[in-house]
Image (cartoon, rainbow, N blue to C red):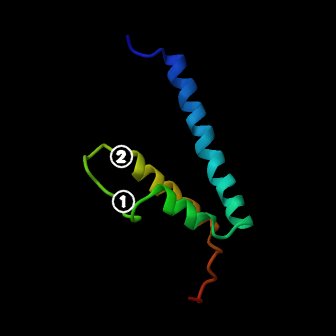
Amino acid sequence: MPPMAAETTDLERRVLAYERSLPSLVTHMAEAEPQFPTRLSAMFSEPMLLRRREHDYTDTDSYAEQFIREVARLVEPPRRPGRI
């Protein structure tokens, strides 16, 4: 028997809530502890290389790597135009 639509929708809403709140939380933690992104990266990913296996398949490690990259992007100070 397939899952009920209400259960699926509830799960999707919960996942979206985590997806929205986690980057903010990790960014705040990284501001308080600058080494946090490095430790997070070391803990959850082997070399930070996105791997492609199947066309429509993304494994858990790849999602973790994407998440860590997004957090790193949020933590980096904005670059000023014309400066390297």
Residue highlighted by disc 2: 58
Q: Quadrant of the N terminus?
A: top left
Amino acid tagged 2: Thr
- Residue 50, numbered circle: 1
Amino acid tagged 1: Leu
Q: Note whether residue 79 is visible.
A: yes
Q: Secondary structure at mark 2?
A: loop
List the single residue furthest toward the top: 1
Nearer-the-camera pick, 30 or 66? 30
Nearer-the-camera pick, 68 or 10? 68
Looking at the image, which residue is at 67% across and 64% down?
Answer: 30
Q: Is residue 5 above or below residue 77?
A: above
Q: Quadrant of the C terminus?
A: bottom right
Could you tell me residue 22's position as x and y percent?
63, 48
- Residue 71, numbered circle: none
**Disc 2: CA contacts within 10 A as few (<14), some (14-19) or many (>=20):** few
Q: Count the labels in the image.
A: 2
